[in-house]
Amino acid sequence: MQALVLEKTEELSIRDIEIEETMGPRDVRIAIRNVGICGSDVHYYEHGRIGPFVVDAPMVLGHEAAGTVVEVGKGVTSLEKGDRVCMEPGIPDPTSKASRLGMYNLDPAVRFWATPPVHGVLRPTVVHPADFTFKLPDNVSFAEGAMVEPLAVGMHAANKARIRPGDVAVVTGAGTIGMVTALAALAGGCSRVIMSDVVQPKLDLAKTLGPILSVNASKDDLAAVVKRETDGWGADVVLECSGNEKAAGSAFGLICPGGCVVLVGMPGKPIAYDVVAGQIKEARVEHVFRYAHVYPRALALMGSGKIDVKPLITDTFAFADGIKAFDFARKMPPTSVKAQIELTG
Ligand code: ZN
């Protein structure tokens, strides 16, 4: 099948590739329609590795996907041919200890699309377990369906924060994950979000998504704004989505006594952690790694109109222009958030 293949660092091609897939009784075959380009796809393209995961053989990229069911395994009752769906890209071993403890995202045996040695989904079809395939509400497009994957990270972060109605959240970093995390925090009950970044066009877009006050951290002091906006008390929750070492290290300065810091972004190196700054507020600190079973709730929020991701899908490329799409994504203009590739399936 024709796929977008990462041959090695800095080398992509669109070519035929043999992928062996067998349909099990609980699997469905899906014709892929929209695939979002994720920071991790671009990182593999540029560096050939993420931490311990090294691309040492050609690998198909892409893990944020939606499409149409074209074949259904004998034991599948939840889906039928023609259903429009999106898919969770990580499949754990259901019998593992982590899965049985309800943390299947932390199962060391999880197989995740476009993470070596597992192929991604920038190709015409994929076979996938029905249990990790979710029907799109009628009013949710394929393009929006492919946004459920990044939104799931924001949903998981909002869950970890244990948001209560009326909370004020700070989101640091206005990339895709920062944006969807802000949307999830608002849908989860936050009265408003204070969002910081250093790229003004991203902040301008963020302001249009809901009750979001944007702060350009290159000009304004975020801590002073948070203090002013919360009558000196501090934010209930800080959702750190930039991966910036300084932003992560200074999160305790933004929260209220008893507040919570959720670390979503992945800093490139270890960060300085001011234990005393956390202690004097009895801060709760949570870490997020992907997500566990939040797709149904993310889709319910999209279907009801409580979450609208459409403004975040800024650039769409045809599959034939897939390599161009990746070169665009690696030098993303500041006005763009999410680039997607549209297949014809
Ligand atoms: Zn992603």
Image (cartoon, rainbow, N blue to C red):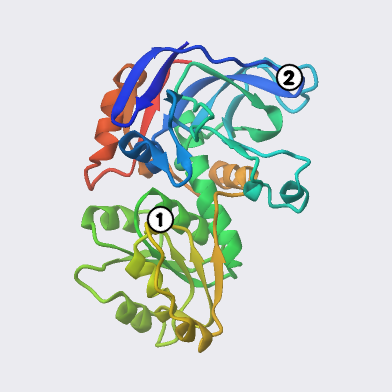
Please tell me which residue lies in front, 94 or 329.
Answer: 94
| Relative to 88, residue 5 above or below | above
Sequence-wise, the earlier of marks 1 and 2 is 2
Is residue 167 visible in the rendered image? The answer is: yes
Q: Which mark is residue 74?
A: none
Q: Residue at x 66, y 34 (%)?
A: 132
Say what amino acid the circle numbered 2 marks: Gly
Percent position (x, y) of residue 10? 28, 30
Q: Is residue 144 above or below residue 184?
A: above
Q: Residue furthest left?
A: 219
- Looking at the rendered image, the disc whose residue lies closer to the viewer, 1 or 2, is 2
Q: Position of residue 147 (x, y in %)?
A: 47, 39
Q: Residues within 10 Å of mark 2 (few under 14, many from 20)?
A: some
Q: Are marks 1 and 2 in contact (CB under 8 Å)?
A: no
Mark 1 and mark 2: Cα distance apart in space: 37 Å
Image position, residue 287 (x, y; %): 54, 62
Q: Position of residue 13 (x, y in %)?
A: 33, 19
Compared to residue 57, the image places residue 88 above or below, namely: below
Q: Residue at x 22, y 58 (%)?
A: 200
Give the label on residue 24, or none. Answer: 2
* Disc 1 target residue: 178
Quarter assignment of residue 222: bottom left
Q: Secondary structure at mark 1?
A: helix
> Would you say 288 lies left or right of 2 here?
right
Horizontally, is 78 left or right of 86 in the view? right
Residue type at tag 1 = Gly
User: What residue is at 49 percent from the left and 29 percent from the top?
Assistant: 142
